[in-house]
Amino acid sequence: MRFRLTVLALVLGTLVPAAAAADRVPASGGACDGWAQLRRVEADGTRVDGDVRGSFHTLIDPRTGRASERWREGPFVLAAGFDGSTAWSRDRSGTTLVHDADHAKRVAVTDAWLERRGWCSPQHVATTPPIERSRGGRRFDVVVATPHGGVP
């Protein structure tokens, strides 16, 4: 799951305006502008993990947080996703695993919240008060967000 979030963080900044234009949703450059009006976001690309190079395909429904990702690691095709109620993954053997333990369900709720950019409409999230931090001479506030039923 962490790979999916990393990829999305890297590619969505360029995909959202293009996807928004394709669906005729005005994109003014903000992270939330027009996002909920999109029907889907798709990304294809190359993945490098050490010496292993492969491809990936990601599909997200920004309205619900349903998502699937398929990637290739050498000769293996792996996959992971969230169907709206259950997270799942397919391992190197081709076996599909359902992630239905309590913590896995809570992680899936948070992943779906991130996929649909739930922070754009923060009515279903608990947040901590801002904590001031600094790094590299820069100061910033940290807020921990936990969507209803999810994990921080």
Image (cartoon, helix red, strand yellow):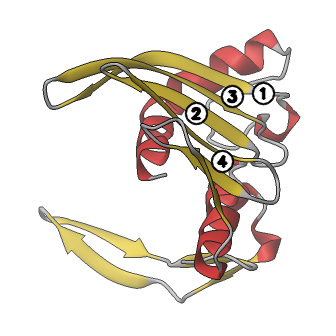
Q: Which circle's residue, 3 or 4, is located before the other in the chain? A: 3
The residue nearer to you, when weighing 100 against 6, is: 100
Q: Which circle's residue, 2 or 1, is located before the other in the chain? A: 1
Q: Is residue 133 left or right of residue 118?
A: left
Between circles 3 and 4, the one closer to the viewer is 4
**Residue at image point 17% right, 67% down:** 135
Q: Amino acid at mark 3?
A: Ser
Establish if 45 lies above or below 61: above
Query: Label 1: which residue?
Result: 40
**Residues at badges 3 and 4 in contact (C-beta under 8 Å)?**
no
Residue 138 x %, y %: 21, 63
Residue 69 is tagged as 2
The image quadrant that residue 52 belongs to is top left
Query: Label 3: which residue?
Result: 28
Residue 108 x %, y %: 65, 63
Q: Is residue 109 left or right of residue 137?
A: right
Residue 115 is tagged as 4
